[in-house]
Amino acid sequence: MNMSAEKTLKKDLISVIMSNYNTPINYLKESIDSVLNQTYSNFEFIIIDDGSTDDSLEFIKSYDDPRIKLVVNKKNIGLTKSLNKGLEAAQGEFIARMDSDDICYPERFEKQIEYMKGHPDTIVCGTWADVIDENGVPREEEWACGIIDDMELYRIKLLFLNRPLILHPSALFNHRMLLKHNIKYDESLRYAQDYKMWTDCAYYNNCHILQQNLLKFRSHKNSISISKRSMQLKCVYIIIQKQLDNLQLTLPDDLKDYHHELLTNNTLFDKRVKQWIKQLLKSNKKYHIYNQKKLAHLLWYRWSRICYDKMSNSKATAILYLFFSLSLRCKIYLIQIRVKNKKK
């Protein structure tokens, strides 16, 4: 057993981990207050100030609540390393993530810990969220990423960074399981560290998403997903490759976008995509990382969907060529797709 797994944890205690770096005071106040006013009060609130250069650190110090445990980085080390410092300091049986610009609904912790205690095989539980803009005004959309009702299929979809992904600041982890499998944030990644966390968690235990909006997720121009999009995507490809390492495969540079969009984009009609699907299935058959039947069904169905859309926009001769060049499995899928489309 890893030495860290011998750490004594306090039963039913939630360790809330938040990192702050120059967060606007109005955002920070709403976020901290939403945690302190939870209906479930048995928690410690670990706030890591990551070398802030504004007034946000002094604002955090103004709170007089014994549950707040402030960790101050002498210099900015980034979110990933700061979160790991929070994990090291955590004493709770459960760990809740929170971002310094988001807002918890009062019953968030109560609802999540109720689920986790009733499902001891679950390593992480996320929630749905309402989306607000930089002024706190609700947007029409919500973060409702479905459910995870098939863990084998979820693990497969994570290979392509496909939804449902867990909204990071909504996550509640089983701390004992993290320690048992030595799971922490990958410090080689400055961005997309949550995606890597989901792939690690899903490898060992079940994941779940509560279909309740228990968080207000703030979407604004300074959000990492918006301001650092290109750098975030580079980290995504690194994480995809880390998963492909288990299959002893290397993702060619010219196929990165194809792989990443395989489950969502119907315009990827390219013979290299078909060959890549064959390589994935061949390697998985050898190394038994994913459920082969479900992987084959998902990938060939997606290829059939791509071919169907191509055929819908092609001339008659091209349609005949495409149809007769497909395997029997894909032809069956094509028929199923056509029937579904007719019913719409």
Image (spheres, rainbow, N blue to C red):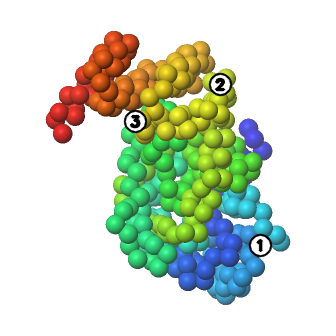
Q: Which of 248 and 20 is in front in this view?
A: 248
The disc label shown at residue 51, or none:
1
Q: Nearer the viewer, residue 74 or 300?
A: 300
Q: Earlier in the sequence, mark 2 or mark 3?
A: 2
Mark 1 or mark 3, which is nearer to you? 3
Mark 1 or mark 2, which is nearer to you? 2
Residue identifier under label 2: 249
* 298 over 13 or under it: above or below: above
Q: Does the rendering let one see residue 339? A: yes
What residue is at 49 percent from the left and 75 percent from the top? 134
Residue 329 percent location from the top left of the image: 35, 15
Q: Distance between the residues labelled 1 and 3?
A: 45 Å
Q: Distance between the residues labelled 2 and 3?
A: 24 Å
Amino acid type at mark 3? Asn
Quadrant location of the N terminus in the rendered image: top right
Residue 16 percent location from the top left of the image: 60, 65
What residue is at 75 percent from the left and 41 percent from the top? 2
What residue is at 38 percent from the left and 69 percent from the top? 139
Left or right of 320? Residue 219 is: right
Q: Distance between the residues labelled 1 and 2?
A: 40 Å
SS class, disc 1: loop
Residue identifier under label 3: 266
The quarter holding residue 128 reads bottom left
Q: Which of marks 1 and 2 is nearer the N terminus?
A: 1
Amino acid type at mark 2? Leu
SS class, disc 3: loop
What residue is at 63 percent from the left and 59 percent from the top? 228
Left or right of 301? Residue 103 is: right
